[in-house]
């Protein structure tokens, strides 16, 4: 299993700076995080770090325990390790996605492209590899939660071919039929819709959809585009809406 590489420094006094311990941001108070990790040491360290950030943390050491907690308590975000006893983290993502679009972050020592893509295609919104810096993980959690709050906040209906996007209502229809998307998929499609006919680079999409300008991973974009294609294209292997512009990025055909 991996390790947390950076925890808050020992001896740091509360109130000693903008990131001081003991002064959690009011913006995260009441936010409940479900941490799914079978390594008790990592689980405890992560819980302590997130609680110092102001989050409320529930813990599970298996996918089965996590599902029981998830159905029993309202969770705002779920952190999932892939290597779990019994059902895997992939299985857990699939099960959660059957009933919820809650943000999911995979936190795993497995960093090869196959695992990253498989995790994202299982329904995760983001992927963080171990060992990681708690500050970076916390920043990604904040970014995901900000996106949840702003998704569907405003905007006029966007129609591109047979695709109809309602930003205010948070709905998408293809040929008049509702299509279920996660919040990240929806924001990605809205970004394409707002710039229909324009090429958007992976870096632009990372910044606009994920809010990452320095630690983003282009694989996030590629995996979400693939997932989006399976939902809005009649043939995902021959996309007619979201097309790849080789060497540049993607665009939604106007």
Image (cartoon, rainbow, N blue to C red):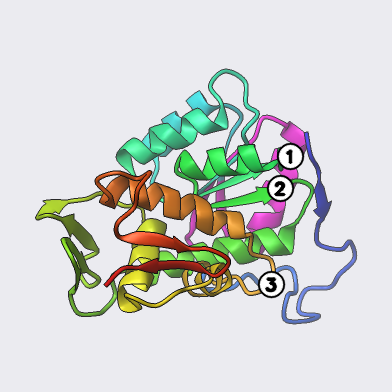
Q: Residue at x 56, y 60 (%)?
A: 141
Q: Residue at x 44, y 43 (%)?
A: 123
Say which quadrant the N terminus sits in.
top right
- On whether residue 74 falls in the magenta region, the answer is no
- Considering only order in the chain, which callout, 1 or 3, is on the residue closer to the N terminus? 1
Most extreme residue toward the top is 86
Most extreme residue toward the right is 11
Question: What residue sits right under mark 2 in the picture?
Answer: 129
Pick the front one: 147 or 199: 199
**Contact? badges 2 and 1 (CB < 8 Å):** yes
Query: In the shown orientation, is residue 184 left or right of residue 254?
Result: right
Q: Which residues are magenta?
A: 29-57
Question: What residue sits right under mark 1 in the picture?
Answer: 109
Judged from the image, the secondary structure of the residue bearing numbered disc 2 is strand
Query: In the shown orientation, is residue 205 left or right of residue 169?
Result: right
Say which quadrant the C terminus sits in.
bottom left
Pick the front one: 50 or 152: 152
Q: Badge 1: how crowded within 10 Å, few (<14), some, or many (20+)?
A: some
Visible residue check, residue 88 = yes
Question: What residue sits right under mark 3 in the picture?
Answer: 214
Q: Residue at x 58, y 71 (%)?
A: 203
Residue 142 location (% of width, % of height): 55, 66
Residue 20 location (% of width, % of height): 75, 74
Q: Quadrant of residue 169?
A: bottom left
Q: Residue at x 53, y 71 (%)?
A: 201
Judged from the image, the secondary structure of the residue bearing numbered disc 1 is loop
């Amino acid at each position: 299993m991996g390790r947390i590489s950076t925890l808050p420094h020992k001896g740091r006094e509360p109130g000693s700076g903008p990131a001081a311990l003991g002064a959690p941001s009011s913006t995260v108070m009441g936010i409940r995080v479900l941490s799914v990790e079978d390594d008790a040491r990592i689980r405890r360290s992560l819980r302590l770090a997130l609680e110092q950030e102001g989050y409320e943390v529930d813990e599970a050491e298996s996918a089965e325990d996590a599902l029981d907690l998830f159905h029993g308590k309202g969770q705002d975000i779920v952190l999932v390790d892939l290597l779990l006893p019994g059902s895997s983290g992939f299985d857990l993502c699939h099960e959660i996605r059957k009933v919820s679009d809650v943000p999911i972050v995979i936190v795993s020592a497995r960093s090869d492209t196959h695992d990253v893509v498989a995790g994202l295609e299982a329904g995760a919104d983001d992927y963080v590899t171990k060992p990681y810096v708690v500050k970076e993980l916390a920043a990604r959690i904040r970014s995901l939660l900000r996106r949840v709050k702003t998704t569907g906040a405003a905007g006029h209906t966007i129609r591109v071919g047979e695709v109809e996007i309602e930003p205010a209502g948070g709905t998408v229809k293809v040929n008049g039929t509702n299509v279920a998307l996660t919040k990240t998929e929806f924001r990605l499609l809205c970004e394409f819709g707002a710039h229909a006919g324009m090429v958007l680079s992976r870096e632009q999409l990372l910044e606009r959809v994920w809010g990452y300008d320095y630690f983003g991973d282009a694989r996030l974009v590629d995996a979400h585009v693939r997932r989006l294609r399976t939902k809005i294209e009649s043939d995902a292997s021959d996309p007619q809406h979201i097309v790849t512009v080789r060497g540049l990025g993607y665009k939604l055909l106007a």
